[in-house]
Image (tube, rainbow, N blue to C red):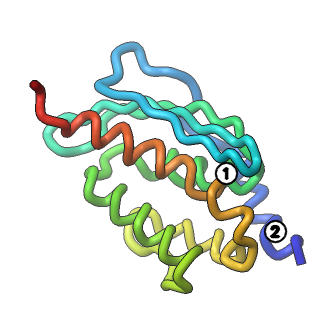
Amino acid sequence: MLDDIYNNKILEFAGNIPLLGHLDNPQADAKAHSRLCGSTVSVEVSVIDGLITAFAQDVKACALGQASASILGRNVIGASPTEVRNAYTQLHAMLKEDGPPPSGRFAELSFLEPVRSYKARHASTMLAFEALVKALDAVEAPVA
Protein backbone atom coordinates (compact mmCIF):
# COMPACT_ATOMS: atom_id res chain seq x y z
CA MET A 1 0.00 0.00 0.00
CA LEU A 2 2.87 2.41 0.67
CA ASP A 3 3.75 2.02 -3.00
CA ASP A 4 0.75 4.27 -3.70
CA ILE A 5 2.28 7.21 -1.88
CA TYR A 6 5.87 6.56 -2.87
CA ASN A 7 5.16 6.28 -6.59
CA ASN A 8 7.59 7.31 -9.32
CA LYS A 9 6.15 10.81 -9.76
CA ILE A 10 6.39 11.62 -6.05
CA LEU A 11 9.94 10.26 -5.93
CA GLU A 12 10.79 12.32 -9.03
CA PHE A 13 9.53 15.48 -7.31
CA ALA A 14 11.39 14.55 -4.10
CA GLY A 15 14.65 14.12 -5.96
CA ASN A 16 14.43 17.49 -7.71
CA ILE A 17 13.75 20.25 -5.19
CA PRO A 18 14.28 23.71 -6.70
CA LEU A 19 15.27 26.88 -4.88
CA LEU A 20 17.25 25.23 -2.11
CA GLY A 21 19.49 27.50 -0.07
CA HIS A 22 19.18 30.98 1.35
CA LEU A 23 18.37 34.50 0.16
CA ASP A 24 20.72 37.42 0.80
CA ASN A 25 18.03 39.75 2.14
CA PRO A 26 14.67 38.02 2.61
CA GLN A 27 11.73 40.04 3.84
CA ALA A 28 10.73 37.17 6.10
CA ASP A 29 11.58 33.63 7.03
CA ALA A 30 9.74 30.88 8.84
CA LYS A 31 10.05 27.25 9.80
CA ALA A 32 7.54 24.42 10.11
CA HIS A 33 8.30 21.22 11.99
CA SER A 34 6.49 17.91 12.36
CA ARG A 35 6.98 16.44 15.83
CA LEU A 36 5.58 13.15 14.59
CA CYS A 37 8.32 12.42 12.06
CA GLY A 38 10.95 15.07 12.79
CA SER A 39 10.73 16.70 9.37
CA THR A 40 11.53 20.42 9.16
CA VAL A 41 11.20 22.93 6.34
CA SER A 42 12.58 26.47 6.58
CA VAL A 43 11.74 29.11 3.99
CA GLU A 44 12.79 32.63 3.12
CA VAL A 45 10.71 34.93 0.93
CA SER A 46 10.51 38.38 -0.61
CA VAL A 47 7.35 39.92 -2.02
CA ILE A 48 7.22 42.94 -4.33
CA ASP A 49 4.01 44.49 -5.66
CA GLY A 50 1.94 41.61 -4.31
CA LEU A 51 3.93 38.81 -5.96
CA ILE A 52 6.61 36.48 -4.64
CA THR A 53 9.84 37.55 -6.32
CA ALA A 54 12.40 35.54 -4.35
CA PHE A 55 12.16 32.29 -2.42
CA ALA A 56 14.57 29.82 -0.88
CA GLN A 57 14.02 26.71 1.19
CA ASP A 58 15.92 24.28 3.37
CA VAL A 59 14.18 20.91 3.39
CA LYS A 60 14.97 18.23 5.95
CA ALA A 61 11.99 16.00 5.36
CA CYS A 62 10.79 12.62 4.16
CA ALA A 63 10.08 11.99 0.49
CA LEU A 64 6.53 13.35 0.84
CA GLY A 65 7.71 16.58 2.44
CA GLN A 66 10.38 16.83 -0.23
CA ALA A 67 7.84 16.28 -3.02
CA SER A 68 5.55 18.98 -1.66
CA ALA A 69 8.51 21.37 -1.29
CA SER A 70 9.52 20.57 -4.86
CA ILE A 71 6.06 21.42 -6.19
CA LEU A 72 6.10 24.64 -4.16
CA GLY A 73 9.55 25.58 -5.45
CA ARG A 74 8.61 24.87 -9.06
CA ASN A 75 5.64 27.23 -8.95
CA VAL A 76 6.16 29.85 -6.25
CA ILE A 77 7.97 32.64 -8.10
CA GLY A 78 5.35 35.00 -9.45
CA ALA A 79 2.61 33.63 -7.19
CA SER A 80 0.58 35.92 -5.00
CA PRO A 81 0.27 35.30 -1.26
CA THR A 82 -3.41 34.56 -1.87
CA GLU A 83 -2.53 31.80 -4.35
CA VAL A 84 -0.17 30.23 -1.80
CA ARG A 85 -2.75 30.42 0.98
CA ASN A 86 -5.41 28.93 -1.29
CA ALA A 87 -3.08 26.07 -2.25
CA TYR A 88 -2.34 25.40 1.43
CA THR A 89 -6.05 25.41 2.26
CA GLN A 90 -6.82 23.11 -0.69
CA LEU A 91 -3.96 20.75 0.21
CA HIS A 92 -5.20 20.58 3.79
CA ALA A 93 -8.76 19.92 2.62
CA MET A 94 -7.60 17.26 0.13
CA LEU A 95 -5.68 15.37 2.81
CA LYS A 96 -7.86 15.83 5.87
CA GLU A 97 -11.39 16.47 4.59
CA ASP A 98 -11.55 14.32 1.45
CA GLY A 99 -11.63 17.49 -0.65
CA PRO A 100 -10.68 17.77 -4.31
CA PRO A 101 -7.03 18.21 -5.28
CA PRO A 102 -5.67 21.76 -5.46
CA SER A 103 -6.16 23.61 -8.70
CA GLY A 104 -4.44 26.49 -10.41
CA ARG A 105 -0.74 27.22 -10.16
CA PHE A 106 -0.18 24.44 -7.61
CA ALA A 107 -2.31 21.75 -9.30
CA GLU A 108 0.65 19.33 -9.28
CA LEU A 109 -0.17 18.80 -5.59
CA SER A 110 -2.81 16.42 -6.95
CA PHE A 111 0.01 13.86 -7.27
CA LEU A 112 0.02 13.76 -3.46
CA GLU A 113 -3.62 12.70 -3.26
CA PRO A 114 -2.75 9.09 -2.28
CA VAL A 115 -1.31 10.49 0.98
CA ARG A 116 -4.91 11.13 2.10
CA SER A 117 -5.14 7.54 3.36
CA TYR A 118 -2.04 7.91 5.58
CA LYS A 119 -2.85 10.40 8.35
CA ALA A 120 0.61 10.08 9.88
CA ARG A 121 2.06 11.54 6.65
CA HIS A 122 -0.23 14.61 6.40
CA ALA A 123 1.88 16.95 8.55
CA SER A 124 5.12 16.39 6.65
CA THR A 125 3.33 16.75 3.33
CA MET A 126 2.06 20.22 4.31
CA LEU A 127 5.25 21.57 5.92
CA ALA A 128 6.62 23.65 3.03
CA PHE A 129 3.31 25.40 2.47
CA GLU A 130 2.78 25.86 6.21
CA ALA A 131 6.20 27.52 6.55
CA LEU A 132 5.60 29.79 3.56
CA VAL A 133 2.19 30.89 4.87
CA LYS A 134 3.88 31.83 8.17
CA ALA A 135 6.54 33.81 6.31
CA LEU A 136 3.92 35.58 4.18
CA ASP A 137 1.99 36.46 7.33
CA ALA A 138 5.18 38.11 8.63
CA VAL A 139 5.69 40.02 5.36
CA GLU A 140 2.14 41.33 5.47
CA ALA A 141 2.06 42.08 9.21
CA PRO A 142 1.57 45.76 9.99
CA VAL A 143 4.71 47.52 11.13
CA ALA A 144 4.28 48.69 14.72
Which residue lies under the disc numbered 2?
Answer: 7
* Image location of residue 53, percent across then percent down: 30, 35
Outermost residue on the top side: it is 24
Q: Nearer the viewer, residue 114 or 120?
A: 120
Which residue lies under the disc numbered 1?
Answer: 65
Q: Amino acid at mark 1?
A: Gly
Q: Nearer the viewer, residue 111 or 44?
A: 44
Above or below, comparing residue 90 to residue 26 in the picture:
below
* Image location of residue 63, percent across then percent down: 76, 52
Above or below, comparing residue 6 to residue 139 in the picture:
below
Q: Residue at x 10, y 25 (%)?
A: 144
The residues tagged by marks 1 and 2 sit, at their Cα atoms, a distance apart of 14 Å
User: In this rendering, would 70 be left or right of 7?
Assistant: left
Q: Residue at x 56, y 76 (%)?
A: 96
Mark 2: few/some/many CA within 10 Å (<14, 14-19, 20+): few
Looking at the rendered structure, which numbered label has been put on residue 79? Answer: none
Q: Secondary structure at mark 1?
A: helix
Q: Residue at x 42, y 74 (%)?
A: 103
* Image location of residue 11, percent across then percent down: 78, 57
Q: Residue at x 40, y 14 (%)?
A: 24
Above or below, comparing residue 69 to residue 86 in the picture:
above
Residue 3 sits in quarter: bottom right
